[in-house]
Image (cartoon, helix red, strand yellow):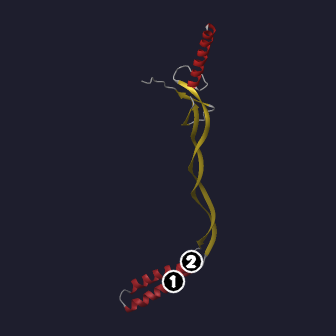
Amino acid sequence: MHLHRKLAVPALLAALASASVQAGGSGYHHDGDGYDFARVTDVTPIYRDIQVRRPRTECWEETVAYPGPGSAAGTVIGGLIGAAVGREAGHRHRGRNARTLAGAAVGAAIGHEISRAGKVRYGTEQRCQVVDQFTTERELVGYDVRYRYNGRHYLTRTDTHPGDRIRVRVDVTPAW
């Protein structure tokens, strides 16, 4: 019987040590500061799509028309025609000089435009405009981390990749 007692004490101590390891379950030693480490079982990166605006300049060549220089002959001929019309209207009514001058001015302007219409030269000019180009980019926002501590599974989100273990806060309170 005495031998039985000698074997019972070491067996009891081994059982208590085994129960203590199973209760903590992390396999890591902690200093009793309220923190321990848990085994990471899965890490999933989390992304979000964002629209990025990048302005860029687009340029092209465009054909443009330049009006040619007006002919003095068209202006003179138009002025003479306008003056004749104004003088004729002035014979029938009072104010012949004013109507002659007004007719000459209108005729000169019309003659000038007619002479310009036939003379056009063409050239090219570069035109540019700023346009917005949008692209979709993926941005890493964090990681969903699954871990196991004390036989239970947990999930948290972190900003950085935790590696194969994650630090956890351990809080033991008495059950009343």
Determine the image quadrant of residue 162. Answer: top right
Relative to 111, say whether 129 is above or below.
Answer: above
> For the N terminus, which image quadrant?
top right
Residue 112 rendering spot, x and y as whole percentages: 53, 78
Q: Is residue 38 visible?
A: yes
Determine the image quadrant of residue 130. Answer: bottom right
Q: Residue at x 61, y 15 (%)?
A: 11
Q: In the rendered image, which residue does mark 2 sit on?
A: 116
Q: Between label 2 and label 1, give the one nearer the viewer.
A: 2
The outermost residue toward the left is: 94
Q: Report the front residue among 174 and 130.
A: 174
Q: Amino acid at mark 2?
A: Arg
Work out how far the residue at label 2 is from the one at label 1, CA to CA, in angstroms: 13 Å
Residue 114 rendering spot, x and y as whole percentages: 55, 81
> For the C terminus, which image quadrant?
top left
Q: Residue at x 63, y 32 (%)?
A: 164
Q: Report the front residue among 24 and 130.
A: 24
The outermost residue toward the top is: 2
The outermost residue toward the bottom is: 92
Residue 81 rendering spot, x and y as whole percentages: 49, 86
Q: Which of the two labelled residues, at mark 2 and mark 1, occupies the earlier sequence position?
A: 1
